[in-house]
Image (tube, helix red, strand yellow):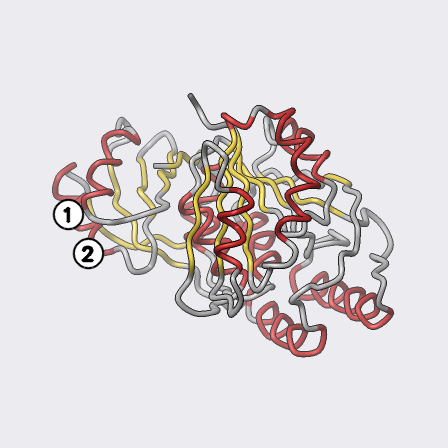
Amino acid sequence: MTLTLSLIIPAYNEAERLALGFERLRPTLQSLDPSTVEVIVIDDGSSDDTLERARETYGHLEHALFVRQPTNLGKGAALRLGIALASGTYVVTVDADMAIDPRRLPDFVAALDDAALVPGSRALSGDIKYDSRLRTFAGAAYNRLVRHYTGTTLRDTQCGCKGFQLGPARLLALLAMIDGFALDVEFLYLADQLELSVRPLLVTWQDVRGSSVRPGHDAWAMIRDIRGLKKTRYENPVVELPVSVTANDVAALAKEARLLGLVIARNAVDALLVLGRDGALGGLGIAGALGGTLRTARLEELRGRTYEAV
């Protein structure tokens, strides 16, 4: 059966909130048909028993995958890994506590029929109101800085619930460099640079206590990361292939080379197999087998293409 939806849950010390999150998700999961949904939990080097609780909570599902990072690398790194592993036609990232009302998930799937990226928004206009005055102030100030440094008009870039078509999601994950919470902004920045279609979706939510976000420490790290976006040279190794190449042609070779999360970026002239920044050696073997050329490609060359996950 074809998997329609991949739900990616990054989790850091979330042992106490996973079960509550699943109870919020359960009714919607049943309405979506669980046999067409995969759940991917990425334990980001937790110091508690997050991985064991995740298996207890989601392990009964037909399609569930649990991966533990050896150390705490950051939410951005966890999301990129989850996207590399995803198999569904559509990908939606969600928080472990399911603070965003899961009943909106079918709306994400519907919107992704004709939009590459559907970011959930808790405030299409105005500021987000948290139960902490400090967090409300920090969130509003951060969003003003994001709009200043990136030019985005979105009032909520940090909503944990975002939907993607799988191909564009893979490309964004391969290109992105931020390991921390500012990956959300980097994804939106890259989507704008690639001219992807973006359609925000208004969501309802609960401000569930126990978040691992540290308003002071994390805010400064996020500001540092977003200030560097426009100065970043985005360049990845690619294998230039004939336009007739198919994902099936590449899949077995990629598996043999132990390369995950690849995407073919096509136009009328050629097909570029986009690799991770550490994938050049494996790409060399694929180029030799398929008569392609290994080289690098900058962001501008990937713009305006169609994107097919391998």
Q: Nearer the viewer, residue 307 or 139?
A: 139
- Counting from the top left corner in percent of width and height, residue 189 is at 59, 55
Tally of marks? 2
The quadrant in which residue 75 appears is bottom right
Please report the residue visible at 71 percent of the width from the left and 64 percent of the height from the top. Answer: 210
- Given residues 214 and 96, the one toward you in this image is 96
Q: Amino acid at mark 1?
A: Gly
Q: How far apart, in angstroms, are the residues tagged by discs 2 and 1?
A: 7 Å
Left or right for 54, reference 255: right
- CB atoms of marks 2 and 1 within 8 Å: yes
Q: List the residue tagged with mark 1.
A: 285
Image quadrant where residue 287 sits: top left
- Which residue is depicted at the point 84% across and 67% down? 132
Residue position for label 2: 281
Give the structural element (helix, strand or loop) at label 2.
Answer: helix
**x, y percent for residue 130:** 83, 61
Q: Is 155 left or right of 8, judged from the image as shown?
A: right
Mark 2 neighbour class, 10 Å CA radius: few under 14, some 14 to 19, many 20 or more:
few
Q: Is residue 19 above or below residue 48?
A: above
The quadrant where residue 270 appears = top left
Left or right: 30 as drawn, with respect to 279: right
Q: Amino acid at mark 2?
A: Leu
Looking at the figure, which quarter contains the N terminus?
top left
**Classed neighbour count for the residue bearing mark 1: other residues with Cα under 10 Å, few (<14), some (14–19), many (≥20):** some
In the figure, is residue 30 to the left or right of 248? right
The residue drawn where x is 72% and y is 65% is 148
The label shown at residue 239 is none
Residue at (72%, 46%) from the top-left corner? 100
At which x and y percent is residue 173?
Answer: 46, 51
Q: Who is closer to the viewer here, 305 or 286?
A: 286
Residue 308: percent from left, percent from top? 40, 34
